[in-house]
Amino acid sequence: MKRLLSLLLLPVVLVGALSACGQPLPSGTTTTAPVLQLAFMRNDDGRSGYTEEDFHRAYLRLSLELLTSQSAGENVLLSPFSILMAMTMVANGADGETLRQMEATLGDGMPIARLTLLLNELSARLAAEPDAKLHQANSAWYADDGSITPHQAFLDELTQVYEALVSQVDFTDPATVDLINRWVSDNTHGMIERILDQIPEEAVMYLINALAFEADWQSPYREGNIRSAPFTNRDGTVTTVQMMYSEESTYLSLPGVKGFLKPYKGGQYSFLALLPDGDADDFVESLDADGWAALFASRVPGVVVSAGIPQFTSAFDCRLNDALEALGITDAFDPNRADLSLIAPQLYISRVLHKTFIQVDGLGTRAGAVTAVEVGVTSIRETTPVILDRPFVYAIIDNDTHLPLFVGTMSRMD
């Protein structure tokens, strides 16, 4: 059976109120209005001179800082795209100091209107690759008991900027959990079957983004290119893995690290592998946006890489509250200081949950991510070997911008 690369982005925003906010609004519906129309109708106060290059730098900085916050000797996999999509949806409903902190952390001070525009432009461009199918869907679900009255301008932004399905539902009915989970499963092609086990009493809204990305390797591995090989884990133990061998044409080399790119079909995306000389976590901690750019500038022309990638499956989950607070988003998590008033009064973020999954084999890659923001209210030649037989750093990147859709570390093979 054909194996496809699947990158699933499922940012989920669970919104709860601290007190009742009046009568509910009628249910919204899907819309075919142009994407990005409403983002410039507010929060654009003259700072929108920020460029696409500024966006790329902010995206990379957030990606690497979040990876550093989690990388501690274990297998880690984050989806920066997923996290940024979820947090920008919330930020579009923030105001005052809460908004300022979110703009500073998510976009290096870029106004949320500009950040939303550039993130959606990136998503649209990535979806245009015919050989790497990108599916994105957004939805909003809010309680029908009068506990929240979302501002119509915010709902309009969801439908017109994010093209979201907006539904008013009974949060006390267990069937609502099944309804939301079914939407999640449908829009992640069955990779993420459930995001909710129950709806807490304080929950009054969910904002959900799902993205499915599918492609094959440009050059799939043949059976004879996959052989058993040892992998030395971070703790020194050795695991036997199925190593996939190939020759690749893009070699990356800087002091202390070497790596390669293996392209996916269509040429828009690649698997990036980096093998540090020392500890992988120490390397991640030292890496910044300039270092990331230097990696791609270090391409050595004419060098053929004798590459080895282990077949692996990894799952990871974490709570991002501490990481995001450490990066500067503090008020949003404080019930006494949070200002999400452009969604509805008296809301704050109680948890940011992130789950990911990746499977790499001979025909391609399957990767999935869920971000939940809970808001209370060939020929013989000389080659250069890069065999991933010990802890390594990896990413799935957009070849045009080098921005990672997924980035992680593999420290132990079980």
Image (cartoon, helix red, strand yellow):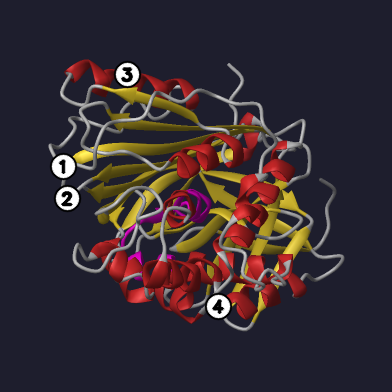
Tell me the number on the disc at residue 202.
1
Q: Which residue is mark 3?
A: 179
- The residue to which callout 4 is attached is 288
**Mark 4 vs 1, N-terminal side:** 1
**CA distance separating discs 2 and 3:** 25 Å
Q: Which residue is mark 2?
A: 18
- Nearer to us in this view, 312 or 225: 312
Q: Position of residue 133 (x, y in %)?
A: 67, 30
Tell me whether circle 4 and circle 3 mark residues in contact (CB < 8 Å): no
Label 4, label 1: how far apart the Cα atoms are: 39 Å
Viewer can see residue 68 = no
Tag 2 near tag 3, CB within 8 Å: no
Give the number of the mark in front: 4 or 3.
3
Report if the CB atoms under discs 2 and 4 are less than 8 Å apart: no
Q: Secondary structure at mark 4?
A: loop
Query: Tag 1, which secondary structure?
Result: loop
Closer to the camera, 344 or 211? Answer: 344
